[in-house]
Image (cartoon, coloured by chain):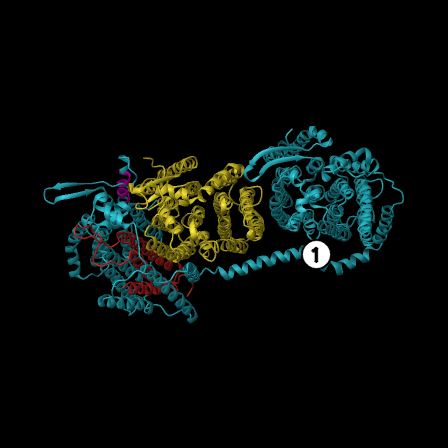
Chain colours: A red, B yellow, C cyan
Amino acid sequence: MEALLSLLIGVMTACGVYMLLRGRTFPVVLGLTLLSYAVNVFLFAMGRLTIGRPPVIDEAVSQYADPLPQALVLTAIVISFGMTAFVIVLALKARAELGNDHVDGERE
Amino acid sequence: MNHLVIAPILLPLVAGIVLLLLRRTPLPFQRGLSLIALLAQVGVALHLLQSVLEGPLRVYALGNWQAPFGIVLVADPLAAWMVLITALLALFALLYALRGGDQAGRHFHVLFQLQLFGLQGAFLTGDLFNLFVFFEILLLASYGLLLHGSGPRRSRAGLHFVVLNLAGSSLFLFAVGTLYGTFGTLNMADLAVHISRASADQQSLARLAGLLLFGVFALKAAVVPLHLWLPAAYAAATAPVAALFVIMTKVGAYGILRLDVLLYGDGALSDLLDAWLLPLALLTLGLGTLGVMASTELRRQIAWLVVISVGTLLTAFALGGVNGIAAGLYYLPHTTFAGAAFFLLADSLARRRGEHDDHFVPHARLADRRLLGGLFFIVAILVAGLPPLSGFIGKFLILRAALDTPDATAWVLAIVLGGSLLTIVALARSGSLILYRSHPAEHGTATGQLWPELLPATGLILLCLGLMIAAGPIDGITRLIAEQLMQPEIYIQAVLGGTGR
Amino acid sequence: MSLLGLVLTIFVGSVLAAGIARLGRLHSAWLSGVVVIVALFQLWPMIAPVADGAIIIQRLGWMPAIGLDLVFRLDGLGLLFALLILGIGLLIILYARYYLSERDCMGRFYAYLLLFMGAMLGIVLSENIIQLLIFWELTSLSSFLLISYWQERSDARSGARMALAVTGAGGLAMLGGFVLLGEIVGSYELSVILQSGHIIRDHPQHLTVLILILLGAFTKSAQFPFHFWLPNAMSAPTPVSAYLHSATMVKAGVFLLARFFPALSQTPEWSWLVGGAGLATLLVGAIFALFKHDLKGLLAYSTISHLGLITLLFGIGTPLAAVAGVFHIINHAIFKASLFMAAGIIDHETGSRDMRQLNGMWKYMPHTALLAMVAAGAMAGVPLLNGFLSKEMFFAEAVSASTHLQLGWWLPALVTLSGVFAFAYSFRFIHDVFFNGEPLELPKTPHEPPRWMKVPVEMLVALCLLVGILPTLTVEPLLRIAAQGVLQTPLPHFDLAIWHGFSPALWMSIIALVGGGLIYSVRHPLFRFHDRVLLPYLQASKVFDFVLGTLFALARTVTGLIDIGSLQRMLAWFVAAALVLGIAGFVSGGAPLRGTADSLPLDGVSLVAALVLIAAAIGTVVLHRRRLISLTVMGAVGLIVALIFIKFSAPDLALTQLSVEIVTIVLLLLALYYLPQQQAPESAWLRRGRDLVLAVTAGGGAGLLSWAVLTRPLDSISDYFLANSVSGGGGTNVVNVILVDFRGFDTLGEITVLALAALGIYAMLERVELTGPDVDRYGRPWNPDVHPAIMASLTRVLLPLALLVSLFILLRGHNLPGGGFIAGLVTAVALITQYLANGSRWTRSRLPANMHPVIALGLLLATLTGLGSWLFGYPFLTSTFTHVHWPVVGDFELASAMLFDLGVYLTVVGATLLILIFIGLLHSNDDSASRPQEEAH
């Protein structure tokens, strides 16, 4: 299972990085989103994988999943949401002012 | 319960929120509020520095949860030093903005205060993930400020700055995650303990995480080859924002210093950056100098000067030891204030040259060229590090520190001194181009309204003069800070109260 | 009296001179004169003790920790130079008052002049060599200001820049030398250094130090090959040339040689470097001086030559030679200053400095002519004038040196040759200017200058005569004191008699005299030869310009290659850097990739889900040019990520991920409306290949990294949270308790980020007019505002329900999955659906578009909750909770953290809506007018 998850993280990172390196703003935004998926899963996995034991205290249960990474990822998700929103709008602004959607605003 | 430690963080936060609530109130009121908040912050910062220099360093357990479980703020002399420098810089940047720069777009004061919230938090926090959060705050605020007002150049530079930093944030999280996944903690002091005791099996991951963190901070600090975002971004920002941004590269340098002397200060991994920092720092210095010589606009040239200052600063840190770090910590405020003053001065110059802006092309002779030229001359001496001003003292201290590492001495001497020379040559050239190679036709504004406009820049220059005159005491302070840094156990003791878990 | 006070007097005077100029044109001149006289009075009482061999040292603490104090030293050498600087400075001030024209700003001139004078005094009175260097560079900077005094003249600016570059460079090299020297000797103070000659000479770095320090001295005193800046500095006002380029600044270089004579001389390296440079300079200067048609040019090259002479004397290194050097420093200062002033007078009264125009001045200004001729005689070394004495000593030293070093005949021969040319150019100066027929088309008709303009010249010329005729009565005492200060040892025997019998030196003088006459008589063919053959090749300044030009070109090329402002390149560098660092880090650790912990078993469902995710992720990339599809496919990735969170027991994350996913997709859809729906392939294959390699490596790295971590055991701090969540945080949902309590500060920061994003977007979109397409890619017209009725009515019914749900999620969050974020996002989504279903106009009529207060209140609430704990004497964000019994709801828990969570909720709702509404509003063109205008001010 660990290996599979690592594979997924790897794939998402690879796709994210490739999109990040494109020349147009929209793919770059998608790339950033993919990358943030990868990072979030990675950060989450750093607490190791636990199945079926959510960290909600219950007398019956003794073992729980590591809650801390979950909290961190939750923070990370919201932060990356804010960032994504910002960069999307920035892409729109750039297009409006540079006349095209190339990341360097090259003339077409 | 003494809340002095958190005051520099909460002041700008509350100020920002209140300014947001009162955004419909008359402008003078908002400006006054912003200014008062900053003055208060300077006062608090002074008090904080004094208290940690005299007494022990202060730890503030947020939510009353003890480290390493809760988030703690740690005011050690280094953090307090950075907080004070930031507050002073921000004060003069704001003073300049009050002359109208804050009207270029909406929410200037809110963004400005929240940027300070991010900066001061980054300096004071003792928790790695919390550091990440504060980085995001100061970045997002800086995006907002950078894009203040509009224009294609600004949008393009902004887009590059934002996307690159988002990639940087992802890397930060990879590094933090790896550290947590390896050592199961986020508190810096606690991490330092674990890293110093890392088992052979953990060392690979620890090194990897450490170098990734170095990469993140190097991006913020604009270390070659991750410096390419800086010139365009700083050149595109409005003057007060550019002035404030001068501190942002220093945040990266601060991170590198903490990484080097605290997180990886002890044990088998303390050699983490040895192979990387000095060569990259000198390379940054060299390429920055070339950039200064190649520039065809004043703002861009100043941006390259910021790159040089990062190279110089990191050279000092890389030389290490009490001498090296103390030299760097003396050079840091000098280069921050001088660079900011230069940005403000450049704005005054550019706005008088109409369509020629800050390009190095002849323009009708300015009525105020004497006064502006005089200030330009002084600032040029400052940034080039020529005697007798503070820049020289900083560089002299660095050269002395270089003697402690014999195999690097020659390189450091050659590159630092050569950089100074080429910088002053380039600045003499651009100064005479922009001020004196002109059509005889006199025009420009009367000197009367010039002085108030130049006051913030003059204030920053005076701070540098203060650094020169009080070089003795200040050198004493920076040495004290450096000595503390060289003994991470003091920091760790204060935070964990014991030897950690 | 204090030496610091002496220097400060001058600096303060400089400031006053600048200020007082407002009151009247001449005030600054008089003030400067007074300042210098005051300084002389301060110096007066110290002369006697120094004459008795005392060394006055005064210390003022500055940076004692690193041995950098302000320490001043007055010994014989310093005294001599102080007198020269102040004395000649006084004459220059008087002279300049008449020289400067109505248009020139007096205040600035005298301010700069005094600034320079102060720096110069600082050099000669410094005990600490770093302090000496500070003043040294200060002279470079102030001379830059003086040379470029006529800022509107480009030759003035370029000359000043060249002088600054050359002397500044020398100064920085010298700094390096001093730093090393201080390390070798263990002190920066002269009294130590001058005693440590043997330590320095035996040190392995001796040669480095010597060269670095000599670079400083040579550039300053215009020694070959650094001599070229001096002639170019002649574009300065003549008083400046007379002061800086004869008496003082260039003398700072030879002062340095004299100062370090005891510590650095007496080695073959010293003799060859210093002597060689001196000899070369002596000849180059003497020969080129003859060919300059410009009066000041001739004097400049003669100055170079005389500086070479002095340098050569110090290079010879015998005590007697050093004495001769000091003696010539004095003499040269006197006659050269007077010559420059005379040249200035001629320039001033005729409007020309070209010796091909200036002829027969004897008729027009006999008095000036007489003075100039005497001074020129001294320069040539005519008997009964001061120049003769030191020149004789110089010849004698050259002879004795060559005999006891077995150099053979060539040194005396070359020295004599220089003497020949010295006579020649001095002849030319006298004959061409004052005789040689009538002046040719001069701008003005020449006449004598104002009376007081000549006084300084008269005084100096009188000195030339006095020293030349009665050396023992006039100059000898001062010379002995000064030489004492140089050698730091008992003086050798010497006498300053005019007649030493028919010594070799005398014969050399005679040869020089005769030969000089001959050379002068055949000057015209020589000029032609010079203009045709020498001039094109022998111009050091050309070399300098070339070097500097090349450097700037190089800088432009390199920077242009690296800094092309391409985001893709920046990102590629960043990814590559991260990979290099990461790999290097892991490899250097030397641990195996796979750890020892055992892993969970694989199950089919997960495998399928994984395959879907992989397919979706790759699909997003492959289809990225068909944007709408690519976006949809990416949504699938997000959903499966949410599934991953559920699978591995993170319900909160799953909920958050889902709601964020929806909002993000909506956002991207809105954005896509303004962006091209698709794009043509543009990246070249090579670029795509590079990116592919980077991407695959990065992915592999990330995957391997997580695998390496996941296969290792973890011992984390989390047990603490599990243990204290209920007892300390009052909540059973540990994740939420961490968010609002254990790590509430993170959360506060993170809602600030969200708020900043909203405000930033709001500020950013000011004055931005986005125009979407009118037709979609199939040519069908976009309908601005059509909404399916069923969906509309449905959403309107659902809204209250959704809001109720979100409230429920918010309240239960502390104990069960949920909390402020998720609740906020659900609310936002619910409201967004109103927009999507009913259109912005309908919705905004019912919902305020202005979300700022909501954001602000949310942040305020969260912060105040944190501050609340101060009242009870606890740190920021300390939480408390209690259980209350509500009639209907039953036992209900109330935690301060929930207030905090409410703040989170409000901020999230406010920020999300502000962003979405704002972008949504941008497109409906009819709304562009009715956009929130409340930021009017």
Q: Nearer the viewer, residue C381 or C676?
A: C381
| Residue C409 point in image, percent of width and height | 83, 54
- Which image quarter holds the C terminus of chain C? top left
Most extreme residue toward the left is C888
Most extreme residue toward the right is C502
| Residue B420 point in image, percent of width and height | 56, 49
Residue C464 horizontal side relative to residue C164, left or right: right
| Residue C431 point in image, percent of width and height | 82, 48
By secondary structure, the bulk of the magenta-drawn segment is best described as helix
| Residue range (magenta) | C859-868
Q: How many marks?
A: 1
Q: Nearer the viewer, residue C65 or B84?
A: C65
| Residue C64 point in image, percent of width and height | 56, 37
- Which image quarter holds the N terminus of chain C? top right
Residue A20 horizontal side relative to residue B363, left or right: left
SS assignment at label 1? loop
Residue C786 horizontal side relative to residue C224, left or right: left
Q: Nearer the viewer, residue B299 or B274?
A: B274
Q: Is residue B160 visible?
A: yes
* B445 within the magenta span: no
In this rendering, is residue C616 above or below B176?
below
Q: Nearer the viewer, residue B257 or C896?
A: B257
User: In which image quadrant can residue C74 be found?
Assistant: top right
Q: Estimate how packed mark 1 is, as few (under 14), some (14 to 19) or many (20 or more) residues with alpha carbons within 10 Å.
A: few
Determine the chain carrying the residue at label 1. C
**In this figure, which residue is indicated by the disc labeled 1?**
C539
Q: Is residue B338 visible?
A: no
User: In which image quadrant can residue C587 be found?
Assistant: bottom left
Query: Which residue type carries mark 1?
Result: Gln
In this rendering, is residue B83 above or below A56?
above
